Image (cartoon, grey):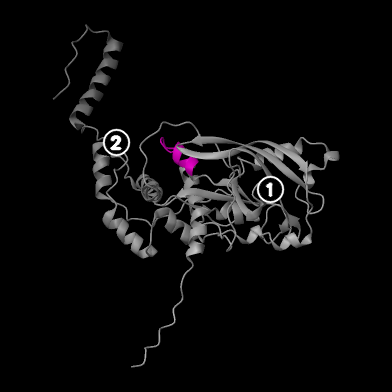
């Protein structure tokens, strides 16, 4: 009996999965090429070489084709159920961003309890580098993704305060570059541990590089994953269905919201408002403030802290508040005029009597008769 021919199968790579898992690889905002590891600084002194690459499109600090050494981008962190990171389209590519729109609506709204949420939703400035750790050279050039405030800010300050004769600004050059001696300190915040550069010195390289090194570095501009408006909105709201399905679910699952209390009004006017309910209007999106400051940590006004709500509840409140404002405006336009108070009817006979009394008083003044008693008003 002949043996049955086995079916051709395509196997996945266990090594690739293990390497990406150990390096903290994520595909929500960054494409890590195969065989490239992510660099993680450690507490103490590290000797680092940062090499240039040929800049691609949309780099905010370099023209395409120029040799550049870093890629600046902005990201929203802690988004969705998995607290993922997403590139901010507005700050990175000058495109519309639903998270920035929602954040600006909270800033304009100015309600208490939004301070922490506004800060959490702000885009954070980060940087990418092609770096080689001289204390672990076997790993070759690694991809370094770090907050601007933990390394780049200190490096910029060091370069600004240096003398031009030092030529420290050429640290990333292939031929004339220098090695960075960086002292990292372990910090912690909110239960998370990270490493911040406290000191940066420039040392002469022990071994120069040649042009072949450019084949080992990555074009950092091509590694960012910039989501579309809908993709980012779905992730922010933790939605998986189409917009139509989302609207249906919102109507069924969203609990009724409390109506805003209005100032006391006349009972008759209040009844008229209840009888004339305006037709519902379509939801409007808050306008994007294009003049918003591009700084990362824009301090919001001090407010009292309230309980946290989910991003989906806040987004629903954002749309509902726009609608309620329109209804309030329409109620003010349709309020009926208040009824004028009716004067009591005047007895015509009484008016005639009053006129006769006036004539008699005039005659009395001329003839000076004895004073008469005043007559009471007729009922």
Instruction: Name the residue carrying label 1.
Output: 134
Residue 216 falls left or right of residue 369 = right
- Which residue is found at the position 54% from the left and 50% from the top? 75
Give whichever of 118, 256 is nearer the camera.
118
Residue 28 image position (x, y, % from top left):
50, 57
Image quadrant containing the N terminus: bottom left
SS state under label 2 = loop
Residue 33 image position (x, y, % from top left):
59, 62
Q: Residue most toward the front?
A: 1
Q: Is residue 275 above or below residue 262?
A: below
Give whichever of 361, 333 is nearer the camera.
333
Image quadrant containing the C terminus: top left
Q: Residue most toward the bottom?
A: 1
- Which residue is found at the position 72% from the left and 53% from the top? 51
Asked if the magenta segment contains residue 269, the reply would be no
Regarding residue 64, the answer to whether it shows in the image is no
- Which residue is found at the position 68% from the left and 53% from the top? 60
| Mark number displayed over residue 265 | 2
Q: In terms of sequence position, does the residue under pointer 2 or pointer 1 come before the other? A: 1
Mark 2 Cα-neighbour bin, 10 Å: few <14, some 14–19, many ≥20: few
In the rendered structure, which segment of residues is drawn in magenta? 109-120
Mark 1 Cα-neighbour bin, 10 Å: few <14, some 14–19, many ≥20: some
Contact between labelled residues 1 and 2, with CB atoms less than 8 Å apart: no
Q: CA distance from mark 2 to mark 1?
A: 76 Å
Residue 242 location, quadrant = bottom left
SS state under label 1 = loop
Q: Residue most toward the top?
A: 370
């Amino acid at each position: 009996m002949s043996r049955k021919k086995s079916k051709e199968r395509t196997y996945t790579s266990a090594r690739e999965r293990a390497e990406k898992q150990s390096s903290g690889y994520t595909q929500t905002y960054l494409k890590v090429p195969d065989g490239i590891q992510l660099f993680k600084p450690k507490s103490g002194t590290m000797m680092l070489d940062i090499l240039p690459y040929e800049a691609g499109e949309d780099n905010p600090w370099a023209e395409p084709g120029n040799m550049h050494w870093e890629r600046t981008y902005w990201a929203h962190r802690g988004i969705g159920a998995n607290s993922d990171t997403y590139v901010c389209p507005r700050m990175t590519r000058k495109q519309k961003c639903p998270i920035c729109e929602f954040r600006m609506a909270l800033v304009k709204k100015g309600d208490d309890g939004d301070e922490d949420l506004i800060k959490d939703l702000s885009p954070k400035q980060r940087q990418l580098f092609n770096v080689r750790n001289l204390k672990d050279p076997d790993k070759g050039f690694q991809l370094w993704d770090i907050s601007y405030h933990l390394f780049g800010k200190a490096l910029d300050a060091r370069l600004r305060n240096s003398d031009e004769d030092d030529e420290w600004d050429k640290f990333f050059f292939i031929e004339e570059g220098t090695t960075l001696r960086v002292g990292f300190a372990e910090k912690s915040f909110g239960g998370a541990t990270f490493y911040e550069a406290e000191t940066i010195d420039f040392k002469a390289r022990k071994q120069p590089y040649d042009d072949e090194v450019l084949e080992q570095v990555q074009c950092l501009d091509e590694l960012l994953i910039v989501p579309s408006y809908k993709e980012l909105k779905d992730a922010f709201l933790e939605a998986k269905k189409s917009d139509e399905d989302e609207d249906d679910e919102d109507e069924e699952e969203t609990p009724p919201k409390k109506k805003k209390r209005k100032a006391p009004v006349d009972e008759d006017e209040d009844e008229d408002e209840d009888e004339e309910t305006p037709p519902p209007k379509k939801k409007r999106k808050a306008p994007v403030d294009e003049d918003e400051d591009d700084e990362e940590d824009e301090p919001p006004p001090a407010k009292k802290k309230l309980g946290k709500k989910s991003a989906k509840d806040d987004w629903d409140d954002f749309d509902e508040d726009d609608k309620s404002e329109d209804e309030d405006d329409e109620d003010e336009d349709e309020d009926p005029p208040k009824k004028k108070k009716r004067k009591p009817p005047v007895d015509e006979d009484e008016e005639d009597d009053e006129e006769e009394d006036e004539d008699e008083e005039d005659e009395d003044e001329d003839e000076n008769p004895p004073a008469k008693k005043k007559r009471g008003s007729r009922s």
